[in-house]
Image (spheres, rainbow, N blue to C red):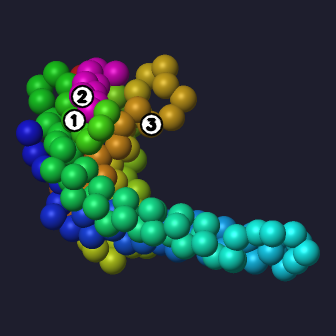
Amino acid sequence: MLPLHPNVPILWRVQGVLSALFFGVSLGVAEFVVTTTLKDRWLPPPFIGAGAVFALFLTFGLVMPGLQYRRWRYAIRNDDVLITYGVVWRVRRCIPRLRIQHVDISSGPIQRMLGLVSLNLYTAGAMGSVASIPGITAPQAERIREQLIGEVETRG
């Protein structure tokens, strides 16, 4: 079983901090609007809830990536692709290679800054991707894609 790239926890932490900022600021604006609109009623001081939400999201955003990274593994085997992940709920997903129809490689701006991409697997009969392998390098993703799709093309 192969691990993800060592930059993946950095990516997940950056995403966690951005999520914490988004939710904290959004809730802070909502709290500010409510407290200024309802001045004559007793309300807790503004930004208490926003601060708590920000602190909670920030804690999870900084702690969980390390735990998730240690649990994430994948293997490209002869008959299938095996992916295992999960901290609280553990998942062991096995995708038969014969059912894989196409493979996409995608990356967002933060992923590109860290030199990472995600490999998305699509199978027959599924509406979207059935699995994604985040945090691998582009050459590695191309090799896996060629390995999975190249064999389908030679069989067909």
Amino acid carrying label 2: it is Arg
Would you place residue 74 above or below residue 141 in this image? above
Q: CA distance from mark 3 to mark 1?
A: 16 Å
Amino acid carrying label 3: it is Ser
Q: Label 3's element? A: loop
Inspect this view and state whether residue 105 appears.
yes
Cβ atoms at labels 2 and 3 below 8 Å apart: no
Q: Residues within 10 Å of mark 2 (few under 14, many from 20)?
A: few
Amino acid carrying label 1: it is Thr
Q: Quadrant of the N terminus?
A: top left
Residue 18 shown left or right of residue 76 in the figure: right
- Residue under pointer 3: 129
Residue 98: within the magenta? Answer: yes
14 or 80: nearer the eye?
14
Image point (34%, 22%), residue name: 99
Image point (60%, 72%), residue name: 48
- Residue 92's tag is 2
Cβ atoms at labels 2 and 1 below 8 Å apart: yes
Q: CA distance from mark 2 to mark 3?
A: 16 Å
Q: Residues within 10 Å of mark 1 (few under 14, many from 20)?
A: some
- Residue under pointer 1: 84
